[in-house]
Amino acid sequence: MRILALDVGEKRIGVAISDLSQSLARSLKVVQRGSRQEDFAAVARLVEEYEVEKVVVGYPRSLDGMAGAQAERVERYAVGLAESLTVPVLLWDERFSTVSAERLMREAGVRSKKKRERIDAVAAAVILQDYLDSRQFAGEKGAEGSSL
C-alpha cells in the first residue's frame, strides 16, 4: 500500500505519493482548491485510485516550533479530512519543505513558470520523503506525526 502526502495551501494542494515499498516519494499533482467538500472528495478519489493506507498532511509550524495561524487552519482542515476518509490522517512537520522544493527545482533547471505550477506537488514530495525517511531511521513504524 502507498502513502499520500498533501501540502495544503490557500489556493492549491500539492499531492505526492510513495512507491509500494514506502521508501520513495514522488510528486503527483496539484489540485486547485474548491470547497472543503470538493477538496475532500478529490483526496478520497486519490486514496482509492492509488490504494493509499495513510495520508500525511504537512503541518506548517514556525521556525521556533510553534503553531501559528496557518498551522491552525491546516490542522482544522486535516481534522475535517480525517472525518471524511476511511484511512488515517496525520500531521507532519513541514518546516522548510517549500524552501527545499524550490532549491531542488532550481538545481534541476526548472523554469520559473513551470516552477509555479509544480512547487506545491514538489513540496508535498519533500514532506513525504521526510516522513518516509524518519520511519526508516526510527525503525519502520517508530516515527509518527500527530494522528487525527
Image (cartoon, helix red, strand yellow):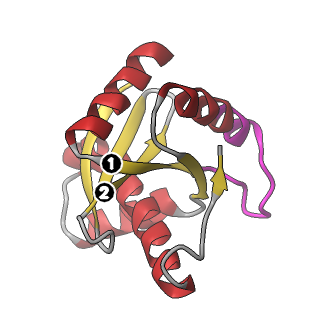
> Upstream in the sequence, badge 1 or badge 2?
2
The reply to whether callout 1 and callout 2 are in contact (CB within 8 Å) is yes
Numbered mark located on residue 62 in the image: none
- Residue 98 at x, y percent in the picture: 47, 56
Q: Is residue 31 visible?
A: yes
- Residue 128 at x, y percent in the picture: 42, 61
Q: In front here: 35 or 79?
A: 79
Q: Secondary structure at mark 1?
A: strand
Which quadrant of the figure has residue 108?
bottom left
CA–CA distance in space, label 1 to label 2: 5 Å
Q: Amino acid at mark 2?
A: Arg
Q: In front here: 135 or 66?
A: 135
Mark 1 highlights which residue? 52
Mark 2 highlights which residue? 2
- Residue 2 at x, y percent in the picture: 30, 57
69 sits left or right of 92 in the view = right
Q: Amino acid at mark 1?
A: Val
- In the displayed structure, 104 sits above or below 31; it is below
70 sits left or right of 92 in the view = right
| Label 1 CA crowd tier, 10 Å (few <14, some 14–19, many 20+) | some
Which image quadrant: the C terminus? top right
- In the displayed structure, 134 sits above or below 75; it is below
- Residue 116 at x, y percent in the picture: 30, 43
The stretch in magenta equals: 59-73
Task: Tell me which secondary structure the magenta stretch mostly adopts.
Answer: loop
Which residue: 39% across, 16% down?
A: 38
